[in-house]
Amino acid sequence: MRLKDNPNLNEKTWGAETNDFGIMELRVEYRNNPIGIGVRVPRFSWKLFGSGRGIRQEGYRIQISEDDPQFQNPIWDSGDVNSDQSVHIEYEGSSLKSRQVYFCRVFAWDTKGRVSDWQNTFFETGILDFREWTAQWITFDPEKHDRPAETLPLFRKTFESNSRLRSARIYATALGLYELELNGRRLNDQLFTPGWTSYHKRLQTQTFDVTEYIRFGGNAIGITVADGWYKGRIGGHPRDFYGNRRAALLELHLTYEDGSEQRVVTDGSWRAETGPIVMASLYDGETYDARLEKEGWSLPKYDDQTWLPVETMARSNHMLIPQENVPTVIVRELKPERALRLPSGETILDFGQNLTGWVSYAVTGERGTVIELTHAEVLDSDGNLYIENLRSAKQKTSYICKGTGNERYEPRFSFQGFRYAKVNGYPGDVNPEWFTAHVISSDLEETGTFECSDPLVNQLQSNIVWGQRGNFLDVPTDCPQRDERLGYTGDAQVFVRTAAHNMNVAVFFTKWLKDLKADQLPNGGVPHTIPDTLPGWEMHSASGWGDAAVICPWTIYLCYGDLRLLEEQYDSMKAWVEFLRNSGEQEFLRNGGFQFGDWLALDAPAGTYTGATPKDFIATAFYAHSANLLAKSARALGKEEDAAKYEELFGNIRDRFNKEFVTSAGRLVSPTQTAHVLALHFGLVEGAFRKRVEKSFIQLIEESEYKPTTGFLGTPYICPVLSSIGRSDLAYRLVLSHDYPSWLYPVKQGATTIWEHWDGQKPDGSFWSPEMNSFNHYAFGAIGEWLYRYVAGIDTDEAGPGFKHIHIRPLPGGGLSYARATYQSMYGEIVSSWKIANKEMTIEVNIPPNTTATLELPNALQDRVTEQGVRLGEAEGVRIIALHENRITLELESGFYQFQFEWRTSS
């Protein structure tokens, strides 16, 4: 009974009344009640809940209404749809309008005949077509009016509103970073708007619900615009990389109860003046002179007679797009763990955690007192700030007191990468309680956890997450501290799978991949950084870097089942592979063009950053890998002709790889760990040759005394490859090692994020070369994928992507007594936990509703396994599908399970 003849379904069903079955977390394009989206055909996803095992949706119904929360006249009604699909269901109604609120509700029924109640949400579109903008760009040049050039401009406008206001929305963007105020109040918590894109191609616009800010009668809007990525110093460029004029664009739409609308837009009637921020640089910091504050400047009664008229600026709006990415926000606040007093009298605050953000503080000082904070990640052996690795970045904030007492300062348009902050000029004693570190990051939902019985590994997992948190700031940057902070493609692709376990990065990578597609070269090549900060540079498209064009969309598809992203990026993926086909000097090889190689590998020749694995070996291996993933993507999209074409290409590359880089006896010509890792992980050797390469790889690990010699391109795969060839014991040995080089060596040195180098700081306190020595560089944190997918065993299925079908294959070992991972998938929480105690293994798993799972019980015998006290063959929701000498393979329906059996160590 699905009550399909009752379209309102207002009465409670049996399932809803008892909370026995229902829908929760109804999302639109991954988001909860999004405002200002630009997706013209949005998708809807939800999770199911209920009692018992084997919850599976049988059907659903969706209704969408326009400005009608009662759904009296829906603009789209799917009707009853018999389907178990509960993620990425596309809207099929009439074209959506700009600046419109839409209400959505869904109910579903399961295979047991239970019917949910309606679950409601809403979404609101931004300005969908750039031609709808009526505002003008406004700008102000301080130098023309005898103001310092770096001082940030303030823009203001007053307007009147009547009392019957229904809603108010601001649509805004800037050339530079901007902040809005309305009637003296700052709007919401978004930072670094409009984000970072190649601004002449794509410029995001934000939507703000300001209904509660509007007063009857007089009102005022204020805009502050900073250099940011647009005009500031970025990527080795002195300034003005994207443009030399800060500018703002804004429309305020006031809708009244009688249906009338009023617009307030940026135009020549606005007025401008400079404010108290006399310098703001992403690399160098911020200087705030409180003596220059314009108190009340965004209030309607502020006297702006001495302010100056703005300039309007003619500029095409073709690049304007509604916000795509999640916003950057403050995600944590930390107090100093301790204050260190230096003999010089200076104070260093230790926040206990390497982070990305800034420090705010309270101060009482005489007018003109200057307080300066210098930020750094580590201290040297003498206890001083180590700032040489910042290169030309200054990472300083300065505040000049106005002398009124009880002043407070918080930066707004710069960020620093730091754990320590040296305080200079503070009047009186420095009380740590007066200082707060604000951690900023893209607002990503944290979806994964991992823990085990080794506290150092738990700290490693924490370091991985903090590294991601600190570097996922609108784009996936390499580091947050030195004069770089760029969206390197190589770093992103090696880490993307770990990133997707830790946090929901679907929206984040969707936006960034659109940036990649926009900046992709006409011949299909891919810049090293996205957004591209090196246009026209002949050195681009390095293997392992440009392959992000294929690896990242495929990974997001695997983790979220997002077929649309694969479709949208397909031309970009294909262009990259065709670029590779055309760039080699010999057919089916890639042996030309600029290459980074295995960057920062420990087998690098003295004086270089590039490992010993030949560059053409690496380039051809990644060429094959991208061709293979493109073939799989084509198959997933139903492009059968392309799938066959690129499967053939992959086969041809593999054959040529074997002729070029494998001897007739099956030995790789490059005796490096990375060469063996890539050949095995990318499936480039088969049969007897594969066995020979596996044996050689193990020998290399043993000869290195169980230490990695790999760099950026080999390290992410080394442990997964060892586990895949049945040598998890060696993978554990690598991961659990405390000695240099290892993942736990930095942990033992006190690291709280992932280092760029295995030995960024040595035991004697000395450092690696300051030219390239970040202490917050997430690439080597890709080991997190192995912790989730192999130690805990949580994985998805290419045939059921997005964890529609789940694989759980835990691999206990390394002397650990327990490990536990959780992952919030699109369907709900997945849990895999194992514990060894008193020679008994307990494995607990949770399979979310509307999914199934394959579970492998390691070293288990059927007659000795129970599930919550029930014999294995009699347990509800469990089906035995394979019995092996050293494991049992089960098929599970959704639900929580606990298996217990005698633990036998593997032979």
Image (cartoon, rainbow, N blue to C red):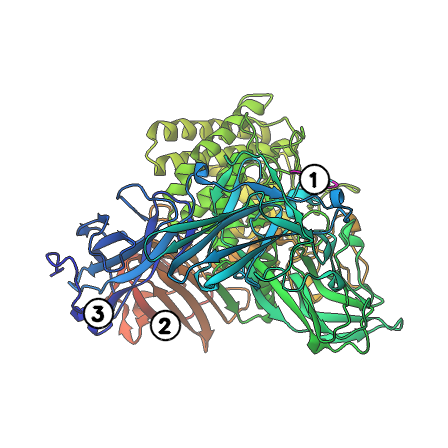
The amino acid sitting under disc 2 is Gln
Residue at the right extreme, as displayed: 344
In the rendered image, which quarter is residue 52 located in? bottom left
List the residue tagged with mark 3. Answer: 16
Badge 1 or badge 2: first in the primary sequence: 1
| Contact flag, marks 1 and 2 (Cβ < 8 Å) | no
Q: Is residue 254 above or below residue 134?
A: below
List the residue tagged with mark 2. Answer: 900
List the residue tagged with mark 1. Answer: 240
Mark 3 to mark 2 CA distance (whole Å): 34 Å
Is residue 596 something that shows in the picture? yes
Disc 3 element: helix
Magenta residue span: 238-243
The amino acid sitting under disc 3 is Ala
Residue 694 is situated, as x and y percent measured from the top left of the image, at 54, 44
Badge 3 or badge 2: first in the primary sequence: 3
Mark 1 to mark 2 CA distance (whole Å): 64 Å
Q: Residues within 10 Å of mark 2 (few under 14, many from 20)?
A: many
Q: Going by the image, does 277 lie left or right of 718?
A: right
Q: As rendered, which of 406 and 676 lies closer to the eye?
A: 406
Residue 305 is situated, as x and y percent measured from the top left of the image, at 66, 54
Residue under the point 39% across and 44% down: 39
Residue 668 is situated, as x and y percent measured from the top left of the image, at 60, 36
Image quarter of the N terminus: bottom left
Residue 259 is situated, as x and y percent measured from the top left of the image, at 33, 52
Q: Going by the image, does 607 lie left or right of 734?
A: right
3 vs 2, front mark = 3
The amino acid sitting under disc 1 is Asp
Disc 1 element: loop
Residue under the point 37% across and 65% down: 860
Q: Is residue 241 magenta?
A: yes
Name the magenta segment's main secondary structure. Answer: loop
